[in-house]
Amino acid sequence: MEFLQTRGRDIVTESGKKVILRGTNIGAWMNMEDFMDGFPGAEHRLRYYAKEILGKEIGEYIFTSLLDHFFTEKDVAYMASIGINVLRFPINYRHFEDDMNPFVYKEEGFLRMDKVMDWCEKYGIYVIIDFHAAQGYQNCDWHADNNMRTALMWRTKQFRDRVIALWEKLADRYKDRAVVAAYDLLNEPTTNNQYNRMPLPYVSDWDAMNSLYHDLYNAIRAIDPKHIIAIEGDDFSRRFVGLDAPYGPNMIYSSHNYSFVLRRHPDVVKGSEEYYRLLDEEFYVSEWWDYVNKYNVPLWVSEFALNDGQLDIFKKEGVHWTSWSLKMVNHALLHCRPDSRYVKFIEPVMQMKSSMFRPSENPAAVRVAEKVKELQDAVQDLFEPVLPGFDWFQHIEYFPKTISDIYVDPLLQHVYLNQFKGLTKADIDELMDSFSFDNCEINKEVEATHKKYCDGRED
């Protein structure tokens, strides 16, 4: 494989061949996410309770077994078979460093990453390393392994220093690996959530973001002058207006294009002419599109829900993309079979989690859902007249999610972990084997879309 570099809006090999990166993410693996892996709450809190409830050996083994079964060489071979040429690889800093032992690095995390590099190199798939969960949290949500709804990294020097230091270790380890396409410095940063997440008018802290990005760029470039560096915008990779101009070669810019068309226009029919018109408007009237055109740099949509309308735009404009995500417990390109042992194992807990905020046959859950909605509306009724500038559209998402993250999910984590009592390591392996490629179902519609847009095949 050849090292990649940028040339204007394009990405090219060292020999000058143009490359369009099209692929997916391996989310829910070295950065686990509750709904994707089929457990409640933040990963690091679940790991803590697992050792408290089940003991250190079994408590740790649950996660080791999940890691061993969830993603293997067979998954990489399958990706190559459908035309995928890039894998975005989300990582959680906790695989490499402990909070009580900062700046001391754990080799086992790097060794697991090395396997991925070797597998992808074998099958001709580039890898983009994505720092998905950073020390101190770069955003306020579960996907940063954050259970407190506050992004501390932006206002805590040691967290910033640890982020830079870990990137230096990663750059030093992979500086000579051409299979690495790029370093994605921070996933979905949010500089406006340094104290909490409320429906405040979003005001970016561009000084904090630009200074950290400059420091990261300079630290990496001192070690690795070759690899592409990817910069994501603020507010979950949607705001670019305050980003500094590119300050060096081999930089690409990354947006996350989860469409709001149907949420903001509930009467629009998906697939209609109006739907596609609104998708076009959403893309072209955006800060990311303005930025890459202003500075003539490549655009990479590093996350989005696979959508033909968006993919047509990406193809037309030469946009690089990675869909979210390869594998989940359900509703993904690869997912556990509905009758698998793990799906049946987690069903009672997942039903409890969903029914607390959605229609349910459980009378107690119905009462919870009704009371949460009643309190949510009462809070809005109380504050909207005196805080008219707040984003009350987001309130309906933030309010129940905060209750879930802070209070409900820790209770559900105990329910989830209690089910492991009495299980042996062999029992746990049988559960987690539900995620293995041979035991997963392939979503044929999603597969066909990847084939069509990755390499032009239509079966």
Image: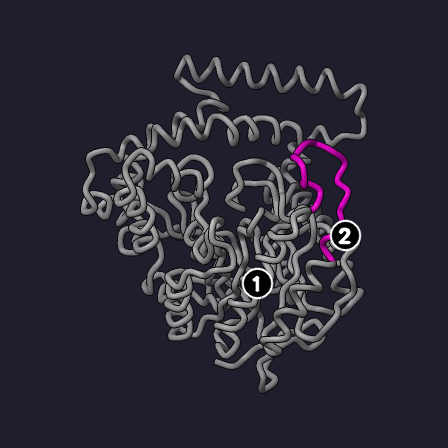
Quarter of the image where the C terminus is located: bottom left
Percent position of residue 90, x then y: 49, 56
Q: Residue furthest bottom?
A: 15
Q: Reply above or below: 154 against 86.
A: above
Residue kind at label 2, given as amino acid type: Trp
Residue kind at label 1, given as amino acid type: Ala
- Disc 1 crowd rating (10 Å Cα; few below 14, some 14-19, many 20+) is some
List the residue tagged with mark 2.
Answer: 206
Percent position of residue 450, x then y: 48, 59
Percent position of residue 74, x then y: 32, 63
Q: In this rendering, which labeled residue sits more in front, label 2 or label 1?
A: 1
In terms of secondary structure, where does tag 2 sit? helix
Q: Is residue 205 magenta?
A: yes
Residue 357 or residue 168, whichever sits in front: 168
Question: Which residue shows up at 48% across the image and 13% down it?
Answer: 367
C-alpha distance separating marks 2 and 1: 22 Å
Question: Which residue shows up at 19% across the image and 34% down it?
Answer: 422
Q: Is residue 139 magenta?
A: no
Residue 153 or residue 420, whichever sits in front: 153
Dot label at residue 251: none
Percent position of residue 292, x then y: 74, 63
Marks 1 and 2: in contact by CB < 8 Å?
no
Q: Is residue 210 left or right of residue 226?
A: right
Determine the image quadrant of residue 337. top left
Q: Can residue 440 be seen here?
A: no
Q: Is residue 91 left or right of residue 277?
A: left
> Which secondary structure type mostly characterizes the magenta part of the structure?
loop
Q: Is residue 211 left or right of residue 350?
A: right
Question: Which residue shows up at 33% across the image and 28% down it?
Answer: 348
What residue span does the magenta drawing correspond to? 191-210
Dot label at residue 165: 1
